Image (cartoon, rainbow, N blue to C red):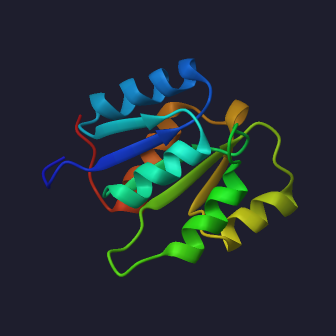
Amino acid sequence: MNQKTKKVLIIDDNQDLIEIYQHKFIQAGFSVEKAENGAWGLKKIQSGHFDLVIMDMSMPAMDGLEMLHQIEQEKKAKGYPKIIVLSNTALDSEIEEMKKTGADECFIKVKVTPAEVLSRASELLNIELRR
């Protein structure tokens, strides 16, 4: 990545998944922070600047859809990050709702690899990945 290091926030209650994505994104040159539930993730989004948020749909304290609604209501002039949602079981109607509410991309966890999420993230952020 030639330009300024991009900041990613990974929000998921599955520590193993966080570590897998954290490793993949750090390896590609991103700066990564993490949050283990939606409420904590929302506070981090509100208090810091992130270029990308990767979030689980089903989490304790606040689920992904509620988080998307909160972010949508609180958008400020500073601009909010691109958002990729990961879900275990989202129906087409739920994916459509997530996209209407601010998600830039939605993936089913078992049908996507961290490399595919990283590739999509680079497209959303319009950057070239470090090789």
Specify whether 55 is left or right of 69.
Answer: left
Q: In x, y percent, where is residue 98?
A: 71, 63
Q: In x, y percent, where is residue 58?
A: 73, 41
Specify whether 42 is left or right of 121.
Answer: right
**Which residue does the image show at 31% across and 58% down from the upper left?**
49
Image quarter of residue 56: top right
Q: Nearer the viewer, residue 52 or 126?
A: 52
Q: Classify 12 as above or below 81.
A: above
Q: Is residue 50 visible?
A: no
**Which residue does the image show at 71% across and 30% down from the upper left?**
110
Q: Is residue 124 visible?
A: yes
Q: Nearer the viewer, residue 65 or 92?
A: 65
Q: Classify 97 as above or below 83.
A: below
Q: Nearer the viewer, residue 107 or 36?
A: 36
Q: In x, y percent, where is residue 1?
A: 19, 46
Q: In x, y percent, where is residue 99?
A: 67, 67
Locate the C terminus and report the quarter of the image it occupies.
top left
Specify whether 127 is left or right of 114.
Answer: left
**Which residue in the rendered view is the most extreme toward the top?**
16
Q: Classify 66 as above or below 19.
A: below
Across the whole image, how many numbered discs are drawn on residues?
A: 0
**Which residue does the image show at 15% across and 54% down from the upper left?**
4
**Which residue does the image show at 82% across and 59% down from the upper left?**
94
Q: Classify 9 as above or below 111.
A: below
